[in-house]
Image (spheres, grey):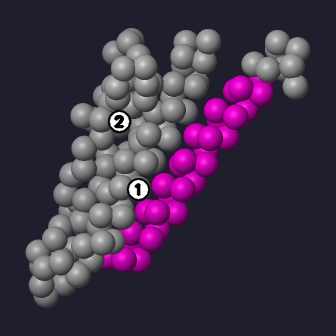
Amino acid sequence: MFAKLEITAMAQAMASHAGARLGAVSQNMANADTPGYKARDVADFATVWEAGQGGAMRSTRAGHLGADPQTMSTVAVSGSGATSPNGNSVSLEGEMVKAVEVRQQHDMALAIYRNTSGIIRASLGRR
């Protein structure tokens, strides 16, 4: 039943995107002192969602709905900040800000999913 609702598919894709982006952010933070490491990020959710739209549901594995992992690969970010003398382009402050954005995106996806399921339960007469 939930699989046929576009809003729940979008919420699931948004949560998957947040997970992929948090993985990139944590990898950047872990390599903050690695010489020559270039910061990486995932394309924004709107780009990923539109790239995956083709009328059909997307799945990461059989029986699982979500955003297509091929469209969520990390790419090197051309940061506006300075590169350190060892060639590293990671800014810990910038990565912390991204982590907060990712958390907000994930919380929004969960709120959408929770409210949608609440509406469906109410329409079925269950609370």
Judge whether 102 appears above or below 29 on screen: above
Q: Secondary structure at mark 1?
A: helix
Which residue extends farthest front? 62
Give the image location of residue 106, x and y in percent: 55, 48
Return the residue at label 2: 48
| Figure quadrant of the C terminus | top right
Which of the pair 46/124 is nearer the observer? 124
Instruction: State which quadrant residue 28 falls in.
Output: bottom left
Query: Which range is magenta?
Result: 91-119
Q: Amino acid at mark 2?
A: Val
Which of the pair 29/84 is nearer the observer? 29
Q: Secondary structure at mark 2?
A: helix
The residue depicted at 82 percent of the width and 12 percent of the height is 124
Q: Are marks 2 and 1 in contact (CB under 8 Å)?
A: no
Return the residue at label 1: 22
The residue depicted at 36 percent of the width and 55 percent of the height is 23
Answer with left or right where residue 22 lies relative to residue 88: right
Give the image location of residue 2, x and y in percent: 60, 18
Answer with left or right where residue 50 lies relative to residue 81: right
Judge whether 118 appears above or below 46 on screen: above
Judge whether 32 appears above or below 11 on screen: below
